[in-house]
Amino acid sequence: MPNKITVLTGDYIGPEIMAAGLRVLEAVSKAGHFEYEATTMPFGGHAIDECGEPLPQRTIDECKNSDAVLLSAIGGPKWDAAPKRPEQGLLAIRQALNLFANIRPTEISPAMMQYSPLKKIEPVNFVIVRELTSGIYFGTPREQHADYALDTMRYTKAEIERVSRVAFQMAQHRNHRVTLVDKSNVLATSKFWRVVVDEVAKDYPDVELNYSYVDAASMKIISSPEQFDVILTENLFGDILSDEAAQITGSLGTIPSMSTGDQKPVLYEPIHGSAPDIAGQGIANPFSMINSVKMMLAHSFDRADLAERIGKAVDQVVADNIVTPDLGGKYGTKEVTDAVIKNL
Ligand code: ATP
Ligand code: MG
């Protein structure tokens, strides 16, 4: 059985960087004898145009039937007045595939250090595991009245346990450290997270667990990011910290992410949006999608060797200063992708 990948090409720069990612996937697969079958399905804005729905049922079915989903950014001004929003598709696909853990790496390799706003001497490499389907974004009651409003942060033991296991297992493949980020000096949900995570930690004796309050953690991401390996946190804190963490690498256009649940498929996508301001110009940074392909090969298909090959090729291209304008370069998406493929 070939490895099955569902491809959701996205809107605006989505298809431009997806094309780059798929070219790299094809090249590295040929070189490394990796067999796969990629099927493109409608999703997002162009799915609204084609079939009136941002997430058609047949796309859900195809995703469920595959090992991994590669997704590029969707939405944009074209659908501002549409009866349905492309972004509804994004929430719907997370729910349909039960993707409760969102993983975002922050990696500043020696080659990429020149683009970081941090003036660090050491390379940085940590991941944030964010709970994605519960917490204050989903809790009820949620009410707005004339003179007060309220939101509800609620977590069950099962919700904390399952995302914690993702973080601990990830740490076992990395540097064996998990930092639980919370606000347990104030919040009941945070105190509860500590109780549940302490319990889960007993199953992973080879992983060191420590704790940080979210305010302190946001400081440390700037001042001493090298101390982190895996950051585990709830939905709201993870949303904020992962944007902060992305920014210290220098460009939104380089960072991939992965969303995972109890079963297949795992979904991989760049963290940025569809960048309507630069669409059609051929200058979108393809690294975010190429890095998404890299992450997919390592995590869904157990091909760390191919992932490493891609990583090294990207580093070489960066070292040669063959980069797009968002990183201060003068090269286009295609030239950068060609250079990556040449270095594979
Ligand atoms: P969304 O709400 O979908 O997250 P956003 O408003 O956060 O979208 P993005 O689409 O992520 O915005 O774009 C933010 C800025 O980053 C834009 O100026 C865009 O051109 C730039 N950008 C995003 N992705 C890339 C990329 N791959 N290459 C170059 N520039 C990018
Ligand atoms: Mg955004």
Image (spheres, rainbow, N blue to C red):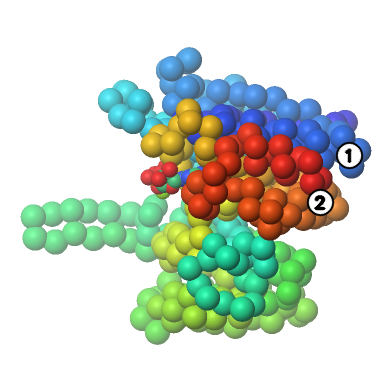
Q: Amino acid at mark 2?
A: Arg
Left or right, 293 with respect to 11, comes to right
What residue do we see at 37% from left, 59% from top? 136
Query: Which residue appears farthest toward the left when viewing the image?
Result: 146
Looking at this view, is 286 or 182 the one in front?
Answer: 286
Looking at this view, is 330 or 245 the one in front?
Answer: 330
* Disc 2 within 8 angstroms of ligand 1 (CB): no
Relative to 185, is 318 above or below?
A: above
Q: Position of residue 91 (x, y in %)?
A: 46, 41
Can the viewer see residue 197?
A: no
Left or right, 250 with respect to 34, comes to left
Can the viewer see residue 83?
A: yes
Query: Element type at marker 2?
Result: helix
Query: Element type at marker 1?
Result: helix
Query: Which residue appears farthest toward the right when viewing the image?
Result: 33
* Rendered image quadrant of residue 62: top right
Residue matched to label 2: 309
Of the numbered discs in the image, which one, if any, rests on residue 85?
Answer: none
Q: Dot 2, how many residues are within 10 Å of its Cα: few (below 14), some (14-19), or many (20+)? A: some
What is the tally of numbered marks visible in this picture? Answer: 2
What residue do we see at 60% from left, 67% from top? 113
Looking at this view, is 162 or 56 the one in front?
Answer: 56
Q: Amino acid at mark 1?
A: Ala
Q: Which quarter of the figure is the N terminus placed in?
A: top right
Q: Which quarter of the figure is the C terminus placed in?
A: top right
**Is label 2 in contact with label 1 (beta carbons under 8 Å)?**
yes
Relative to 120, is 47 above or below?
A: above
Residue matched to label 1: 31
* Disc 1 within 8 angstroms of ligand 1 (CB): no
What residue do we see at 69% from left, 81% from top? 208
Question: Label 2 vs label 1: CA separation?
Answer: 10 Å
Q: Position of residue 164 (x, y in %)?
A: 62, 66
